[in-house]
Image (spheres, grey):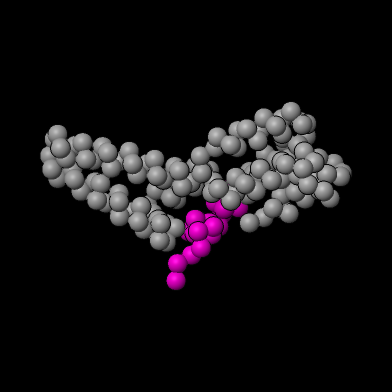
Amino acid sequence: MFPTTADRVSENTAAHVNERIRRETRWQAERIAARGPLAVRRRLRELDREWDIERTLEANAATLSAAGAALALGVDRRFAAIPLVVGGFLLQHALQGWCPPLPLFRRLGVRTQSEIDAERYALMALRGDFRGVDEGPSAARAARALDTTKS
């Protein structure tokens, strides 16, 4: 009835957007791999700080809810509808994996944790953390590493 947690966002994202995110992830891994171990280490630190779609949606919902509550208390009580609507959207996202801001954030390139982890594991494999992936030209190694980490 409900999609799995790991799949719910990608199942509710347009196929061309999912494909663009995959292409950009592959391109990024190939580019970083070609730059060497220091670039890989730097990129892994960047990935540790990257906000995934869940965190982005939560921050967006919290901001809109707080603003709506403040406006309801200070300006007009009809603004109380904002936190109610935002809360409903957040519940919809929790259950179905879709809510109105999701398509916008995905088009902006905000990735799921699984997508971020796929790049992370590909870079770790390129760094030599895993066996059997670290042979050949860097672009081919990046592609193989990403293929082995598909979620």
Q: How many tags in the picture? A: 0
Region in magenta = 1-21
13 is within the stretch colored magenta: yes
Residue 143 visible in the picture: no
Quarter placement of the N terminus: bottom left
Q: In this view, does 99 lie to the left or right of 28?
A: left
Q: Is residue 37 left or right of residue 91?
A: right
Q: In this view, does 99 lie to the left or right of 8?
A: left
Q: Nearer the viewer, residue 112 or 22?
A: 112
Q: Where is residue 142 in the image (x, y as percent from the top left)?
A: 76, 44
Indicate whether 66 appears above or below 86.
Answer: above
Which residue sits at x=43%, y=50%? Answer: 102
Farthest residue, direction bottom: 1
Which residue sits at x=62%, y=32%? Answer: 45
Residue 88 visible in the picture: yes
63 is within the stretch colored magenta: no
Q: Nearer the viewer, residue 136 or 113?
A: 113
Q: Where is residue 34 in the image (x, y as percent from the top left)?
A: 78, 34
Quarter placement of the C terminus: bottom right
Which residue sits at x=33%, y=53%? Answer: 89
Quadrant of residue 139 in the image?
A: top right
Farthest residue, direction right: 136
Q: In this view, does 96 lie to the left or right of 7?
A: left
Which residue sits at x=54%, y=37%? Answer: 50
Q: Where is residue 149 in the image (x, y as percent from the top left)?
A: 69, 53
Farthest residue, direction left: 76
Q: Where is residue 19 in the image (x, y as percent from the top left)?
A: 60, 53
